[in-house]
Amino acid sequence: MRRTAVLVLGRRQPLAQDVLEAVQALHGAGAEVTVVTHDPVAVDGVPVIVVGTTTTAARPTGPKAIRLARLAWRTLLRRTPGAVLARAVGRSADSRGALDAADVVVAADSDAIETVWRHARRRPGPVVVTGVPAGVRALRGPGTGSR
Amino acid sequence: MSRQPHLLYVAWAFPPCRAAGVYRALATVNAFHDAGWRVTVLTTTREAFEQYTGIDPSLEGLVRPGVEVRRLPFSWPAQDTDIRTYGALRVLLPPVWRRLRLWRDKATFPEAGYGPWRGPLVAAARQVHRDGPVDLVVATANPHVTFEAAHALYTDDRVPYVLDYRDAWALDVFSGRRLHGARGREARIESRVQRDAREMWFVNEPIRRWHAEQRPQLTGRMHVVANGWDPDVLDGAAAPPPRRSGTGIRFGYLGTVTPKVPLDELLEGWRTARGSGLVPTGSTLSIAGYLGYFATPRPEMQEAIARAHDVGVRYVGPVAKADVSTFYAGLDVLVLALGRGRYVTSGKVFEYAATGRPVVSVHDPGNAASEVLRGHPLWYPVSGLDAAEVAGALGAAAAAAATRDAGAHEAALAFAEPLSRARQLEPRIAALRGALEQREGVA
């Protein structure tokens, strides 16, 4: 029986080629893959759940002190990309359903970690990892999917 | 010396670890074993390599039977991929967590990630010495925490030791600058372990000279032990490439693509060469190896390679050591892309030379690898890293590959003969054995 994996993309405007490679790697390890992303991405033959489209985030500019202050402010107000994605996923019934059904949940990048971490606190069963290679290892290793 | 001498070899990276430094460790251990030594290796677990660096299972079969390998647990929280182990601080305030983690790592030994390994490593070295007296310790770095195990046995029992620098601790081999202050904690520890070392090995003369300038009183103990190439790995790769029906030339790069490798410059030069016809239509550039130091590939590198797909560039992924020979055999020209710096060599440069194929050097001309290849009859270096210059070198190598000059191929193989790994290690092993016998005689 094929296992299920959810790939969570935290990165804004992900490249379709990258996502396709990641999906193929997980698929090659024996998983049916669903992608959860904040920004739309077109990947043929793979269910993609889009939880919200962002306006392009302006690249941080200015002196280091100002940038650090802005980061601290965003962190305090929970407006970091990771926090925004986690909230959006929490509001999306489709993405919650996909995550609940997954044997392995993979955070594709650092901005996806908070989403996957919050899911892990809610559901003790699935393997939750960061990075596609770790996801592939989890799928190939024993004991995956003890939901 | 009447009994078999006992070597303790200390290395974080050892088979099946796939990290670049593992080949030197493997070759050193096998060379000591072949020279009649009893060899015990202290390293970390297979699970640690699986999780943090990736593994090459084919390497395990290359360790000589009879070599005892003791594996110590190692955890590297900063590289941990299991999100369930993450605390709230790490997830919600990652920069703060990273700072605190670094501080904890360096509490016992000033090396990020590896510092906490100091205690278990020293204890294990002492255990090995209790189980069977050690006559010599070779500790290879990085990580430099391995030096502590060697120094502990010296302090306890005056066991002589060798510091094997695959890189450098105080010197940034890319920029040539000092990495930490001359009176800092790292410098004090390095000064102590160097002072008591029997020998120090460096991979090239520029790095040895730099260290000799720092401590002139120790110059006599500092030696170059270059990486060299391994005949059992390259079996079959030295045959000339088979004749093919198409016009395209098969270029290839094999090695870890670190952030220092001029990947963008190489791809830009390749695109120019293909566009201008310097490299024939249908030619391909295969990039093999890990993208980055760790098991997780660096996304920006994946993207850069994917963007050049339209001009025949493809990423073939890591190549197991057992398959290296096959990979080379399927290529016409090898591309040596290295980071900038006069202290930078690589292990690959020796392998490349030993294939007898044209080699295109896409790196700073002042790089130490240039000294290895100077005089190679099929060497095509660049004088700068702009696209036109890289394209020109690729074109010249393509022309050489197309002529298929058997004489040049033979000359290239002859050039590589003195660069074999055995020729680098044998003199030092003999010298160390001689010193041990002299010591026993005196005792």
Image (spheres, rainbow, N blue to C red):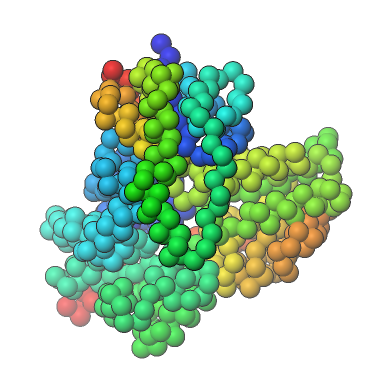
Location of the C terminus of chain B by quadrant is bottom left
Q: Check the image and name the residue furthest to the top.
A: A1
Residue closest to the eye, B154 or B443: B154
Q: Position of residue A83 (x, y in %)?
A: 39, 39
Q: Residue at x 54, y 59 (%)?
A: A61
Q: Position of residue B98 (x, y in %)?
A: 32, 54
Q: How many numbered marks are there?
A: 0
Q: Position of residue A87 (x, y in %)?
A: 39, 32
- Write down the quadrant of residue B45 in the picture: top left
- Write down the quadrant of residue B4 in the picture: bottom left
- Is residue B100 found left or right of A20 in the rendered image? left
The answer to whether residue B31 is visible is no
Residue closest to the eye, A64 or B4: A64
As drawn, B187 above or below B337: below
Q: Residue at x 75, y 55 (%)?
A: B269
- Is residue B332 found left or right of B303 in the rendered image? right
As drawn, B84 above or below B108: above
Q: Check the image and name the residue furthest to the right.
A: B277
Q: Residue at x 61, y 26 (%)?
A: A42
As drawn, B284 above or below B218: above
As drawn, B97 above or below B282: below
Q: Position of residue B129 (x, y in %)?
A: 16, 60
Q: Residue at x 50, y 43 (%)?
A: B297
Location of the N terminus of chain B by quadrant is bottom left
The answer to whether residue A71 is visible is yes
Residue closest to the eye, B364 or B386: B386
